[in-house]
């Protein structure tokens, strides 16, 4: 095992490559009219295991890169207005149910198509469920659409998506161990995860102004930034005991502080911190994948169908559900595209299935391929769909319109009497 000094050198090498080569590739892709984050992924592929194998993907580098993406999601939370998010939460919940159901069902049918037993097909479906919002956040930031209606919707759904993925994975582990679902255990996970997340947002929002007011009164320079980052760090640590990802905690903390006094200046500080380290994250995810290992000819059909299902599940579930509840068609398509990327939960689901002997290595390789392709295609697709169709300033759910019409009709009938 390398010593502390060697680990520090690995970090310096990774940061040096990310902040020079990664930035140069970002510039190249920006000049080509494509999202710069695509440059990070290409640079990671070239410097990583697929080609040159000089980018370190050790645990310490991964740790630092995950810190970077947590800061990115923290910033995304700060850019989301608390009141807007909470007002739209029922709508986000309906869309999440639709897209999770579609993605899981398509994956399950893919497993059935290839002759997997029910418990094996379940994990094939699980691989396709969760969205990795980090790449969509950066792509939306680069095209100036993070605060758009669709951008906020993508973030809201992705947060609920992670909670849904956690529940489905826990249910799958229960199925693998006992052959049946442990309903009590599953309900406990659902209740604890939802209550913990909502309680974090609601309580922290209620005290956010008191926290910032206290921090501003301190005489030490940078106290406000330090206190807010400290709150996030403590919450992220506590969340592990209820099974919630620190990435979800990062967004929750940012959302809770989004309307606090003096937070705009802090948001810019967080952004400055997040951008260089998020480059490290995107390069690391690409560098860790060896395309030559992923592409095995005997599983070509399985890979192709899994990739098609990965895109179709979000397009049908996220896009169609968004359209049905009231989003215009261009906006529904933007939401679906923003939900395409997969990352950590996709790999986690595949890991549990393969390590538990439920699925073979082809499932893990399919998950890696899905992560690779969705991360490469989402930024240009997201930019393309934002160029088509008008911008929207508000969304009224169809059920609200129906309720309004019903009330108007009742009022009219009452007057006629």
Image: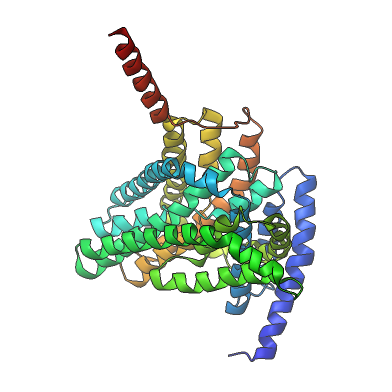
Work out which residue is located at the far top of the displayed protein and give it.
416
Q: Is residue 63 above or below residue 206?
A: below
> For this rendering, which residue is in front, 67 or 221?
221
Task: Work out whether residue 235 can be spotted.
Answer: yes
Where does residue 228 sit, x and y in percent of width and height? 62, 67
Q: Could you say which quadrant of the image residue 44 lies in? A: bottom right
Quadrant where the N terminus sits is bottom right
Where does residue 322 sit, x and y in percent of width and height? 46, 35
What residue appears at the point 73 percent right and 66 percent down from the top-left corner? 18
Q: Could you say which quadrant of the image residue 331 lies in? A: top right
- Left or right relative to 264: residue 107: left
Where does residue 367 sit, x and y in percent of width and height? 46, 59
Q: Is residue 379 above or below residue 400?
A: below
Task: Work out whether residue 252 can be spotted.
Answer: no
What residue appears at the point 48 percent right and 42 percent down from the top-left corner? 87
- Left or right relative to 200: residue 178: left
> For this rendering, which residue is in front, 57 or 277?
277
């Amino acid at each position: 095992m390398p010593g502390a000094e060697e680990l520090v050198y690995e970090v310096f090498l990774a940061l040096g490559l990310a902040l020079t080569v990664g930035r140069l590739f970002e510039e190249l892709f920006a000049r080509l009219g494509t999202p710069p984050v695509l440059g990070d992924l290409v640079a990671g592929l070239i410097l990583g295991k697929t080609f040159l194998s000089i980018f370190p993907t050790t645990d310490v580098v991964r740790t630092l890169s995950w810190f970077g993406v947590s800061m990115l999601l923290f910033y995304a939370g700060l850019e989301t207005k608390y009141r807007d998010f909470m007002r739209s939460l029922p709508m986000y919940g309906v869309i999440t149910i639709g897209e999770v159901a579609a993605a899981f069902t398509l994956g399950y049918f893919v497993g059935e198509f290839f002759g997997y037993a029910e418990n094996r097909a379940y994990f094939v479906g699980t691989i396709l469920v969760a969205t990795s919002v980090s790449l969509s956040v950066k792509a939306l930031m680069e095209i100036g659409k993070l605060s758009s209606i669709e951008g906020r919707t993508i973030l809201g759904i992705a947060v609920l998506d992670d909670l849904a993925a956690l529940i489905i994975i826990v249910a799958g582990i229960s199925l693998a161990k006992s052959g049946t679902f442990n309903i009590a255990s599953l309900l406990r996970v659902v209740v604890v995860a939802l209550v913990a997340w909502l309680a974090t947002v609601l309580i922290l929002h209620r005290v956010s102004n008191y926290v910032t007011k206290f921090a501003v009164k301190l005489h030490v320079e940078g106290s406000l930034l330090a206190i807010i980052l400290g709150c996030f760090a403590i919450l992220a640590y506590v969340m592990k005991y209820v099974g919630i990802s620190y990435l979800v905690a990062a967004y929750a903390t940012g959302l809770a502080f989004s309307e606090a006094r003096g937070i705009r200046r802090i948001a810019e500080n967080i952004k400055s911190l997040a951008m260089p380290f998020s480059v490290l994250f995107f390069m690391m995810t690409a560098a860790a994948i060896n395309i030559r290992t992923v592409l095995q000819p005997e599983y070509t059909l399985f890979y192709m169908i899994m990739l098609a299902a990965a895109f179709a599940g979000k397009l049908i579930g996220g896009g169609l559900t968004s359209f049905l509840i009231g989003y215009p068609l261009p906006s529904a398509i933007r939401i679906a595209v923003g939900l395409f990327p997969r990352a950590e939960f996709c790999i986690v689901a595949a890991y549990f299935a393969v390590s538990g002997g439920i699925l073979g290595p082809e499932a893990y390789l399919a998950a890696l391929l899905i992560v690779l392709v969705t991360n490469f295609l989402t930024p240009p697709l997201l930019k393309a769909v934002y160029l088509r169709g008008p911008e929207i300033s508000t969304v009224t759910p169809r059920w609200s319109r129906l309720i309004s019409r019903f009330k108007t009709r009742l009022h009219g009938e009452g007057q006629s009497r």
